[in-house]
Amino acid sequence: MSDEAVADVSAEIDDAAKPPVSLTEHRPLLGIGLAIAATMLFATNDATNKYLIATYDVPLVAAIRYIVHALLMLALLGPTRGPELVTTQRTGLVVARSLCLVVATLFAGLALQRMPIAETVSIIYLSPIVVVVLARPILGEQIGVIGWLAALGGFAGVVLIARPGGGLDPAGVTFALCNVGVTVTYYLLSRILVRSEKTLALLFYSALVGAICFGLAMPWFWFGAVPSPFEIVLFISLGLTAGLGHFCFTAANRYAEASLLAPMGYLHLLWACLLGWLVFGQLPDGLGLMGMAIIGLAGVGVALRSRFAGR
């Protein structure tokens, strides 16, 4: 889950960091539609994850999600594009980036156990805004007025969501903020690696390393109730929604510019709020909704900043 919030925004960062490329076919409406479908799939993944971790331990749920995702990529892409999945130029950094996503997944799952989907996803979406602030000292990138305003807005949004007396579990907020810290490292490594590595390889290594790490931990958490047929379907769907979400977002970039698609990623916050309400009956209060809106606007500001900067 909310590791999908990590994944879909990292796709924006990866694409934004690349030099301009020609589109396979210029069909912006189709590209936007695919991007919106991707955010819906990622939010569905969040809701499914939250439902399952109410009964099963986070490492067990994460293990099945990553194993299914890795097997799906091998089955669909292995026969035709196998070398692209495993060929890397800087394998050590690629693995380190994947390990960051593994840790982020753990923190996200622990946060989702204790907080509603909407609030958890919103806090995690602070990550790309923090990257804007750190990009100058670490990567030498310019921040600009829009970048600073977006950063201040993002922090203000988190304060409104996680304010004292807001009713959120302090441990859940802590885990979500720990996710942000690890995810920022993941994003910065993405910016470094995107110029030398293929997108498919980065996606596959993330799935493979997650499957190995959580798979090794799975025997220690495989106890308790045997999953019902419905829960088995949900377990399998975790990998399917993650894989299809990545496929839709990648396909969207064939038809529309990344700078046009980037703001669409923040619809994830809307779907998370709706599913949290429909599935779990959880709806943020007025100040929480205001904080989510501010974070979403700040994120869109960051995305638009990269679009205008490229002109």
Image (cartoon, helix red, strand yellow):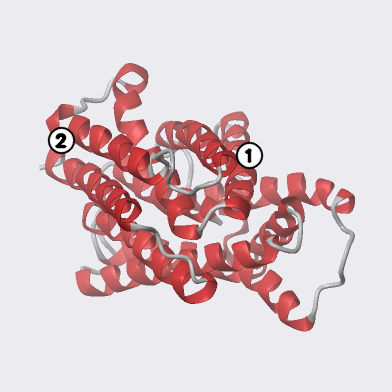
Q: Residue furthest bottom?
A: 229
Residue type at tag 1:
Val
Residue type at tag 2:
Ile
Identify the residue under disc 1.
Answer: 103
Q: Secondary structure at mark 1?
A: helix
Q: Secondary structure at mark 2?
A: helix
Name the spot of residue 80 as percent of width and height, x first. Answer: 59, 66
One can see residue 221 in this view? yes
Among numbered discs 1 and 2, the one appearing first in the sequence = 1
Residue 42: which numbered mark, if any?
none
Name the spot of residue 232 as percent of width and height, x first. Answer: 75, 76
CA gap between label 1 and label 2 equals 30 Å
Residue at image position (63%, 54%) is 113
Identify the residue under disc 2.
Answer: 146
170 relative to 275 in the view: left or right: right
Residue at image position (47%, 32%) is 189
Residue at image position (54%, 34%) is 178
Q: Quadrant of the N terminus?
A: bottom right
Name the spot of residue 83 as percent of width and height, x first. Answer: 61, 53
- In which image quadrant can residue 301 be found? top left
